[in-house]
Image: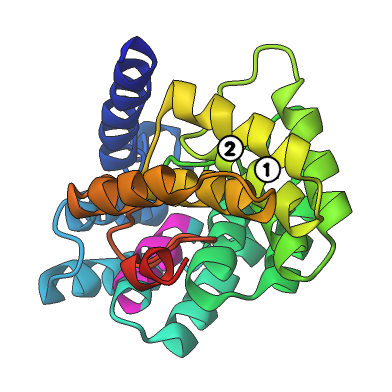
């Protein structure tokens, strides 16, 4: 419970962070037109998704065409509405102008929204040039971006490479775990047929934060080993019905499991 509360507190802090990250210190901007653009941007960022907000970003870009943040924030509503073509044109412009600031976000979105795993890996590998020690976190706060890179390799069938990346990340001194790190590592080992390592990670995940998908995979390991798995299956269904599952506001988590899959186990 204490560990879950720690994760929950981290999530709340992330919400505060993401609500304020869009704001820019306009006093640090050079040039009067770009300062005015910055002020328009800060105002528009508070009303993201509304027409007036988009028009504010347009005016900011008109005043200061090299103001990367305006392209990035203007892109976000298109991503959320599923207009990935328009989003990509805008976010690519933001990355071209300020790769250090926006590569991580684009890499995460390629992974989570577009399922462009090769593109995500390319962005996150490039990001290492700017942040060699720590790539930062995904936009939803659930993962370190190194774990996102590992999941991308896993999705492309490079399971051993994916497992190695996660293992090294977990062993990094001072590393703050994401909500589902051990689960994703456990699934990767499960898919490799390394059931001892898989179960070890599912058990560790249960100690830190348990949910239906994790219990489901524990029951799968038991079934493969011809052990009693029905109690775990029942618990997985119960936990699923209680709403304790992998959730994301806009998309579906990598390696998410649904009730029908648990029922069919």
- Name the residue: 39% across, 15% down: 3
Viewed as shown, does residue 243 lie left or right of 76?
left
Is 159 placed above or below 140 here?
Answer: below
Work out whether 205 lies above or below 251.
Answer: above
Q: Is residue 262 visible?
A: yes
The relative height of residue 11 versus residue 52 in the rendered view (above or below) is: above
Quadrant showing the N terminus: top left
Horizontal side of residue 66 vs 262, given as left or right:
right
Q: What percent of the width, then of the height, locates residue 78?
A: 34, 78
Q: Percent position (x, y) of residue 213?
A: 44, 51
* Mark pair 1, 2: CA separation: 6 Å
What span is colored magenta in the figure? Answer: 69-78
Instruction: Kindly identify which residue carries mark 2.
Output: 181
The residue at which mark 1 appears reads as: 185
In the image, 240 versus 118, the foreground residue is 240
In the image, 206 versus 155, the foreground residue is 206
Residue under the point 65% across and 12% down: 174
Residue 86 picture location, percent across and down? 43, 86
- Asked whether the beta carbons under mark 1 and mark 2 sit within 8 Å of each other, the answer is yes
């Amino acid at each position: 419970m204490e560990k879950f509360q720690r994760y929950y507190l981290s999530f709340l802090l992330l919400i505060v962070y993401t609500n304020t990250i869009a704001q820019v210190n306009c006093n640090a901007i050079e040039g009067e037109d770009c300062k005015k653009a910055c002020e328009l941007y800060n105002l528009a960022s508070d009303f993201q998704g509304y027409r007036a907000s988009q028009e504010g970003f347009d005016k900011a870009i008109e005043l200061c065409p090299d103001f990367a943040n305006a392209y990035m924030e203007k892109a976000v509503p298109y991503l959320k509405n599923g207009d990935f073509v328009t989003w990509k044109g805008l976010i690519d412009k933001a990355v071209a102008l300020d790769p250090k600031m926006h590569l991580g976000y684009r890499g995460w979105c390629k992974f989570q929204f577009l399922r462009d795993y090769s593109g995500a890996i390319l962005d996150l590998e490039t990001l290492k040039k700017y942040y060699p020690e720590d790539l930062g976190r995904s936009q939803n706060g659930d993962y370190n971006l190194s774990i996102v890179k590992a999941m991308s390799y896993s999705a492309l069938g490079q399971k051993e490479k994916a497992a190695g990346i996660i293992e090294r990340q977990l062993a990094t001194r001072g590393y703050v775990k994401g909500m589902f790190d051990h689960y994703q590592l456990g699934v990767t080992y499960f898919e490799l047929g390394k059931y001892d390592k898989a179960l070890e990670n599912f058990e560790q995940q249960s100690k830190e934060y348990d949910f239906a998908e994790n219990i489901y995979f524990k029951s799968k390991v038991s079934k493969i080993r011809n052990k009693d798995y029905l109690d775990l299956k029942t618990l997985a269904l119960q936990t699923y019905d209680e709403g304790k599952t992998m959730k994301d506001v806009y998309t579906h988590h990598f390696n998410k499991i649904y009730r029908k899959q648990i029922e069919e186990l």
